[in-house]
Image: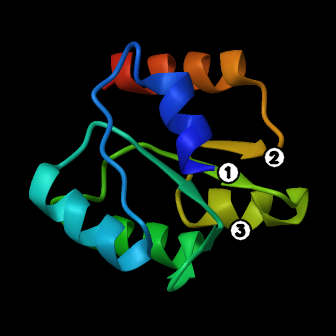
Amino acid sequence: MRLLVRVVLTDEYEFNEAADGFQALELARRTKPDLVVLDVMLPGGDGLALLERLRADPVLRDIPAIVLTASPDYEMAARTVGAERFFTKPFDPDELRAAVKDLVVSQ
């Protein structure tokens, strides 16, 4: 999934990626990204827990987040913990690009 997201976004955006939720949190703390794209199912933890940790961090709480998942059942939970956008896999690459552009420009 990381490869697909990278392919969709790297032509227009600088892209960092983490192998799991722990690395993602540390990477976010080091780089303070303009946006995070995360999957609900992550190695070493779930993406919603990671998003809760981002939202609890005073420095990272305002970073927009896009959540990807295979199940639409997670949409309400994702929005409750602060996801600005939610995509069910498989997602339309053009819709992901548009969401990223909207969230990055609106900052």
**Residue 17 image position (x, y, % from top left):** 36, 51
Q: Please tell me whether residue 88 is drawn above or below residue 69 in the rendered image.
A: above
**Amino acid under label 2?**
Thr
**Residue 59 image position (x, y, % from top left):** 15, 60
Quadrant containing the C terminus in the rendered view: top left
**Residue 3 image position (x, y, % from top left):** 55, 42
Q: Which residue is mark 2?
A: 88
Earlier residue among tags 3 and 2: 3
Q: CA distance from mark 3 to mark 2?
A: 13 Å
For label 3, the SS is helix
Label number found at residue 54? none
Between residues 61 and 21, which one lies in front from this camera angle?
21
Side of 12 where 57 appears, left or right: left
Q: Please tell me whether residue 106 is drawn above or below residue 61 in the rendered image.
A: above
The reply to whether dot 1 and dot 2 touch (C-beta < 8 Å) is: yes
Which of discs 3 and 2 lies nearer the camera? The answer is: 2
For label 1, the SS is strand
Badge 3 density bin: few <14, some 14–19, many ≥20, Cα 10 Å: few
Earlier residue among tags 3 and 1: 1
The reply to whether dot 3 and dot 1 touch (C-beta < 8 Å) is: no
Q: Which residue is mark 3?
A: 77
Q: Which residue is mark 1?
A: 68
Q: CA distance from mark 3 to mark 1?
A: 12 Å
Badge 2 density bin: few <14, some 14–19, many ≥20, Cα 10 Å: some
Between residues 73 and 2, which one lies in front from this camera angle?
2
Side of 68 where 47 appears, left or right: left
Identify the residue shown where x is 42% and y is 67%: 19
Q: Please tell me whether residue 59 is drawn above or below residue 1 in the rendered image.
A: below
